[in-house]
Image (cartoon, rainbow, N blue to C red):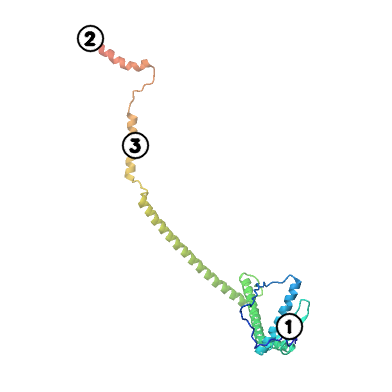
Amino acid sequence: MFPFPSSRIPNPIQQKATSKGVGSETMVRGKTQMKRIENATSRQVTFSKRRNGLLKKAFELSVLCDVEVALIIFSPRGKLYEFSSSSIHGTIARYKKHKKDVQGPEKVVAEQDIQIMKQETASLMKKIEILEASKRRLLGEDILACSFEELQQLESQLDRSVTIIRAQKNQVYTQQIEQLREKEKHLVAEYARLSGKYGSSPVQPQDGSSQQNEDVVSEDKSQVSEVETDLFIGPPETRMKPAIQPLLILSSENENN
């Protein structure tokens, strides 16, 4: 037990005088920062003051509240300072016993949970191995050691799988066809709307009108071929002879008359 001088033990009933009359002085302290004091001298002084204050508070708590208090302090140099209201070793033994009693049920529950998790893990590992073996058999691997019943069961399972796959494939095809039909309807409606809006629908020519157009073209070609022109190719004398001969005939007739 840490010794306290009788003159320094405070009286819990005595109250401190805090009168603020005339002539009383008040001290203002700054806020202490919670970090390591770098100055070794200041650090040692602070340790001594706060250690004594802590031991004093522990003594007051044990006396005022009638509780069992144990306090252990090691200085930076390794010096031990301790205080106990009864016995430091008895208090530590009591603490260990209480800690064991409190953690006992929790430890048992934790161990039971661990055992359950181990069992579940082993069960899952077995299921995984069975699934892996079944997968290899479905792929045609490791089937040499299979019996006839196992092979027949595997064949039945594959047949069922193929049936299900085909049914699903047909369903997908049907859905795709329905979607394409809906898309076709939408495109047809859109085309009709645009044709009615802009009048861009193509006009198909009739057979009678096409035949009539062909007759008109043929008639135009025949008329062009029958037209004579005054164009003459040759020397000027031969071109003028047909025009001079009728004039000579007329002049001779007039003379005879």
Lateral position of residue 239 relative to residue 117, left or right: left
- Pick whichever, 154 or 190, lies toward us: 190
- Amino acid carrying label 1: it is Ile
- According to the picture, the residue beneath numbered tag 2 turns out to be 256
In the depicted structure, whether residue 67 falls above or below residue 187: below
Residue in view at x 42 percent, y 58 percent: 184
- In percent of width and height, residue 6 lies at 73, 88
**Quarter where residue 147 is shown:** bottom right
- In percent of width and height, residue 171 lies at 48, 67
In the depicted structure, whether residue 244 falls above or below residue 136: above
Q: Is residue 146 visible?
A: no
- In percent of width and height, residue 162 lies at 54, 69
- According to the picture, the residue beneath numbered tag 3 turns out to be 217
Q: Which mark is residue 72?
A: 1
- Quadrant of the image containing the C terminus: top left
Sequence-wise, which precedes: disc 3 or disc 2? 3
2 and 1 marks in contact (CB < 8 Å): no
Query: Depth-wise, is mark 3 or mark 2 nearer the camera?
Result: 3
Label 3 residue SS? helix
